[in-house]
Image (tube, coloured by chain):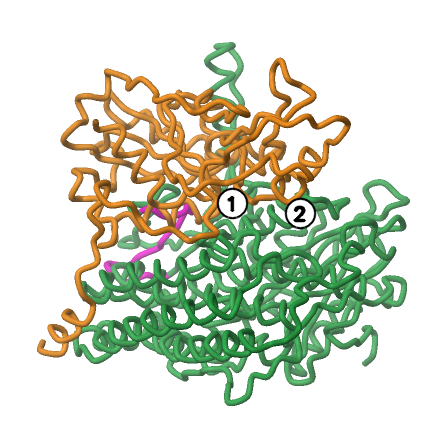
Amino acid sequence: MLRIIKERLQQKYRTLDYPRKKPALSPRYHGRPILTPVNCGACRACYAACPAGALLPTLGAEEGTPTLDMGRCTFCGACRAACPKGAFTFSDEHRMASFTREGLLVTPGVTPQVQPHPENFRIFRRSLKLRQVSAGGCNACEADCNVLGTLVYDLGRFGIDFVASPRHADAILVTGPVSANMRLALLDTWHATPEPRIVIAVGACAISGGLFRESPQCHGGTSSTLPVDMYIPGCPPNPWTILDGLLSLKT
Amino acid sequence: MSTSLRFHYTTAVAFSALPVVDGDTLGACVRQLLDDGWRLLALFGLPQSDKKRAVSLCCVLAHDASSELAALRTEPLHNFISLTPSCPQAHLFERELFEQWGITPEGHPWLKPVRCIPDAAEAQARESAQEHAAVQTIPPPFRFYRVQGEEVHEVAVGPVHAGVIEPGHFRFQCYGENVLHLEVALGYQHRGIEAMLRNGPRARCLPVLECTAGDTSVGHATAHCVLLERLTGIVVPERSQLLRRIGLELERLANHTGDLGAIGGDTGFLPTSAWNGRIRGDFLNLTAALCGNRFGRGLLTPGGAAYDLSSEECADITSRLRAAGRDARGAVDVMLHAPSVLERCTGVGALDAKTARDLGLVGVAARACGLERDARRSAPLSCLPSEAWAPRCQQAGDVLARALVRSHELDDSLRMVEEDLATLATMPDKAILAPDASKAKANLPPNMLVVAQVEGWRGEICHVAITNDTGQFLAYKVIDPSFHNWPGLAVALRGNQISDFPLCNKSFNLSYCGHDL
């Protein structure tokens, strides 16, 4: 017993006063991308380099910097390395969650707008219970959701918890590209969740199918199967990104 | 008997040099090699490029003591005598052959698909039933092994589990509380990874392989890069070898810490469970300090590493590593001194060395049974020094043994990372990419067979590739350690109580998606 208490003192207090204090992220962390409009001429190096197919021609400026779809992006930085004009930078901004799929598109030269908050989530303001379903996820998104329960993040203090049964849940948090073999279980879980219910897609796979978008064994993300209310991009999203997304559901 | 081609594990061999035998000779040769202390690395089907629907078998075995590999293949065939009754480690490989190519291993004791489950068909049937009320397809029967008896009952768990974990189905046959048999039915996570790699290399291959099992991103990325380098003869600069090993050992540290915490959690010892969850994150953040991603994605590139560390960064990471290492050691020691934990973990989920050898277990689970299996020893990736280091073995093969192996490996990995960071900080050579690295991106040497073995934190990751006439992947096999070890968990649970399952499961902590691909 004394040994445990002694070790407890050694381990210190570790919970971060989030969101009042900003988390310290690695200087090499790839946060929200910032795109500078440049004239690309015939150069298509970034399109060729992107392994996720996340770059799309910008509407009205097809010869310039492409639009980046964070819903597909794995935040690998290949576009930044490929661009001879330095049009791509990754900021240290971890807050990237969006209520709409369009909100994940990063257009060159456009500052992201604060999104209107959907009214119908007010009921979950004080208590939000999540049922996580991994539908072909690689265990990285799952691990970064799991970590929210640890004492650094201490998800419970915000009134948010992961629960064991969909019957107890207000929201389904989906990870993975929705593999053909998990589709049934995902649908069953959703049907078992009482209304009103929220669907949260975490990670590039769950949002768009990610790297597995074209695999015949996958369904290209959650929206193929369920109506999605919130998108949290990343491969996997940083735990702070996920926490920020979950907190924005409650404000 | 020399019906197989023997070669050193780092060599890429001409595919035509593989002896071509019939199915029976393959069986006899594999049995002989297994009796001589070899183990099965891979057994898979190979479509013939010239003939449609003709598939031959290709088999790769490894001999750990001599660091040698053996390979052989068969003529195209439709059936062969199953190896599984005498060599249980062929069990899942033969089921996979049956599923992917329709090749029947005759006399296989439990022939059913590995990843093809009826759920996909049922989801589709429900949808079409909504659209056209008349159409109803009945999914094919999917049998589970059943124990008959008046008081025997069956417990079905999954695919969606209570925690935040991946999906899989477990079917227990119980007599009272005691488990007579456990069948592990996976496949829910199947994403078609091997099919996506075929006809590569492409820019997407490496990121996809990093997602094979997200918690082993660096392990699978290393295997893929090493495979390409062996195939093309690229020599990786020593600096990158160090960076790769740092990434690999940080991955081991993070996961071993997390697993030990989870074992604490399942024995009801909450202090370590709570602390280790945090410390695991510290190790992941060290990986993020290296390459920006907590799971080490993007750290590697064929021919070297994508990120370097300056001496100041090395010093910063070293001090953070020491702090996290001290906290991990303290938290784990408290747990391993608690009589309640020791009592709960001793004798639960025990496997003996013979069973482990027969099943072909690898990694932590094998070492906990006394098998000295560690690819860092038998198939080192580089000539980096690793003195004063040996595989950490235990003899008991139970949950406690698996916990102790992890606990000892924490110390080894901490020391290794610290030494590598010190070397890195003073190394004058700053090159992190081989000058001829672009060779791995173009077409590869044609008609070759190459193998990469990497000791990931769960155990040996094995990638096998065969190139076609034009230098693309004719076949790319990914064998995650979980593929070997899931049957180990099923056998370990026999004779235990069903309430021991969560603890046993945590002590193995196998990957669902690594198995399902």
Q: Are marks 1 and 2 on the same chain?
A: yes
Relative placement, left or right, of A125 versus B378 is left
Residue B348 point in image, percent of width and height: 30, 72
* Camera-side residue of B135 and A128: A128
* Camera-side residue of A208 and B59: A208
The extreme left residue here reads: A2
Residue type beneath disc 1: Gly
- Residue topped by disc 1: B187
Q: Residue at x 62, y 60 (%)?
A: B305
- Residue topped by disc 2: B205
Q: Residue at x 51, y 52 (%)?
A: B213
Q: Indicate whether residue B166 is drawn in magenta.
A: yes
Residue A160 point in image, percent of width and height: 21, 38
Q: Colour of chain B?
A: green
Residue B42 point in image, percent of width and height: 67, 63
Q: Quadrant of residue B509?
A: bottom left
The extreme bottom residue here reads: B388
Q: Chain of mark 2?
A: B
Q: Indicate whether residue B367 is drawn in magenta.
A: no
Residue type beneath disc 2: Cys
**Label 1 element class:** loop
- Write down the region rendered in magenta: B164-180
- Assess disc 2: are there few (<14), some (14-19) or many (≥20) residues with their C-alpha within 10 Å of its C-alpha: some
**Label 2 element class:** helix
Confirm whether residue A21 shows in the render: yes
Q: Quick one: which chain is orange?
A: A
Relative placement, left or right, of A73 versus A191 is right
Against A112, residue B488 (above or below) is below
